[in-house]
Image (cartoon, rainbow, N blue to C red):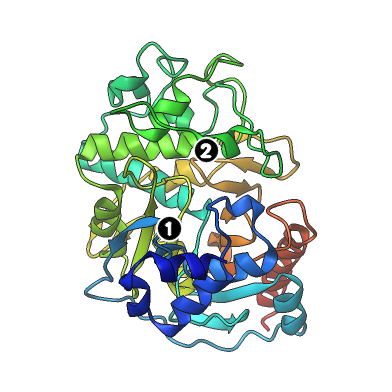
């Protein structure tokens, strides 16, 4: 067991709190989340930043002026216990007009804990591109990626624009199958970076081209990691620091967050934020406020008009992809991560639904359809004045 290894490994284990020791005892001996059991994930998803053998992380301190989330009229969801159970929800916060209409926790998690985001982090990362444009650090979405990451020159990414990265239409070959041990998303985690080269750049610059840039949408977490490298290179700051300055502080996030680091010390921009469920919900409010917070415009005034609207067809009726956001033709938008992490935003109803979970499978289980049904149920309840 991992705990036995840790006890033998040094005195730092004895200094850990009782909860963390228990979590460590339940953890696997490897860092491959896709191979963990359900019980191992239940233990790990609330403690990814507290496992020294598995992760390093940069801290994001809370805002000095937390945004209040006043209590609103309770939303009477008749089957809420079933929703919590069937989706294996750890946290659920429903806001309307900035007020809490429903808040529930499960799996032994609570409002004070941090749950991992997985690909929900992609939408935070893309928002930092908007902030960097507002700051003048990124000149244009039409700039070539290699202008900001010289290590990509001569690779398949040499002719790819920032916009094409944001819309996952680079045309570079990539396999994102979470249940295929030979996929790129799995192989990337096992790869040894070239000496002196960022881990993401080292892996992605070796990939071949499959399509001309801009023509085909293809989901690619590696490219969001690349967006993170691009942002930090442009603003000359660690991604976690920039996130604090541009979102966490002005948007009034209440709790500390963390961002896991990759093999070469850069934040893993395509995933791996750890935050309180309430603060994921506050990100939804930041979007509803059009990126204005703390008395200033953090992203360009037209940023979310582009980012949260359909830029690419994904082959599913009624849905599309924006700048690292999943879009709905009714104007709603979502950030989504494997195993059930999500932020759903419905501007027409001033509605935000933030959820954290540990689904039975990464994406292919029954919970995804159940979550979509829950979104529709909440919208219908609001429309009915419930």
Which disc number belongs to residue 341?
Answer: none
- Tell me where residue 163 appears, x and y as whole percent: 43, 29
Which disc number belongs to residue 190?
Answer: 2
Location of residue 190 with respect to 91 vertically, above or below = above
Query: Which quarter of the picture shows residue 346?
Result: bottom right
- Residues 336 and 48: in front is 48
The answer, for residue 254, to whether it is visible in the render is: yes
Structural crowding at the residue carrying mark 2, measured as other residues with C-alpha within 10 Å and reported as few (<14), some (14–19) or many (≥20): few
| SS type, badge 1 | loop
| SS type, badge 2 | helix
Q: CA distance from mark 1 to mark 2?
A: 15 Å
Question: In the rendered structure, which disc, 1 or 2, sits on the residue that comes first in sequence?
Answer: 1
What residue sits 48% from the left and 19% below the top? Answer: 206
What residue sits 47% from the left and 69% below the top? Answer: 47
Query: Which quarter of the picture shows residue 55?
Result: bottom left
Residue indicated by mark 1: 53
């Amino acid at each position: 067991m991992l705990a036995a290894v840790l006890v033998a490994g040094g005195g730092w284990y004895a200094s850990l709190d009782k909860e963390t020791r228990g979590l460590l005892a339940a953890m696997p001996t490897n860092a491959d989340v896709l191979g963990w059991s359900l019980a191992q994930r239940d233990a790990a998803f609330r403690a990814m930043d507290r496992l020294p053998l598995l992760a390093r992380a940069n801290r994001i301190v809370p805002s000095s002026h937390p945004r209040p989330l006043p209590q609103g009229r309770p939303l009477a969801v008749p089957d809420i216990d079933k929703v919590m159970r069937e989706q294996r929800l750890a946290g659920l916060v429903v806001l309307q007009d900035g007020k809490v209409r429903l808040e529930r926790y499960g799996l032994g998690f609570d409002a004070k804990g941090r749950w991992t985001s997985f690909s929900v982090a992609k939408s935070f990362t893309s928002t930092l591109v908007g902030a960097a444009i507002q700051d003048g650090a990124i000149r244009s979405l039409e700039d070539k990626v290699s202008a900001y990451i010289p290590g990509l020159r001569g690779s398949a990414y040499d002719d790819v624009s920032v916009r094409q990265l944001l819309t996952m239409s680079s045309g570079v070959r990539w396999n994102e199958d979470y249940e295929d041990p030979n996929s790129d998303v799995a192989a990337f985690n096992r790869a040894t970076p070239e000496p002196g080269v960022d881990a993401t750049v080292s892996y992605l610059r070796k990939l071949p081209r499959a399509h001309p840039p801009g023509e085909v949408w293809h989901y690619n977490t590696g490219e969001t990691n690349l967006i993170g490298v691009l942002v930090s290179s442009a603003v000359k700051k660690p991604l976690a620091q920039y996130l604090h300055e541009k979102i966490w502080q002005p948007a009034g996030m209440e709790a500390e967050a963390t961002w896991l680091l990759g093999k070469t010390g850069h934040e893993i921009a395509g995933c791996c934020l750890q935050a309180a469920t309430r603060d994921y919900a506050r990100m939804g409010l930041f979007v509803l406020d059009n990126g204005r917070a703390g008395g200033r415009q953090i992203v360009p005034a037209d940023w979310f008009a582009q980012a949260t609207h359909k830029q690419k067809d994904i082959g599913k009726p009624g849905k599309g992809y924006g700048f690292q956001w999943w879009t709905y033709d009714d104007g709603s938008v979502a950030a989504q991560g494997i195993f059930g992490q999500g932020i759903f935003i419905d501007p027409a109803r001033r509605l935000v639904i933030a959820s954290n979970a540990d689904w039975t499978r990464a994406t292919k289980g029954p919970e995804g359809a159940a979550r979509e049904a829950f979104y529709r149920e909440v919208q219908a309840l609001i429309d009915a004045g419930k």
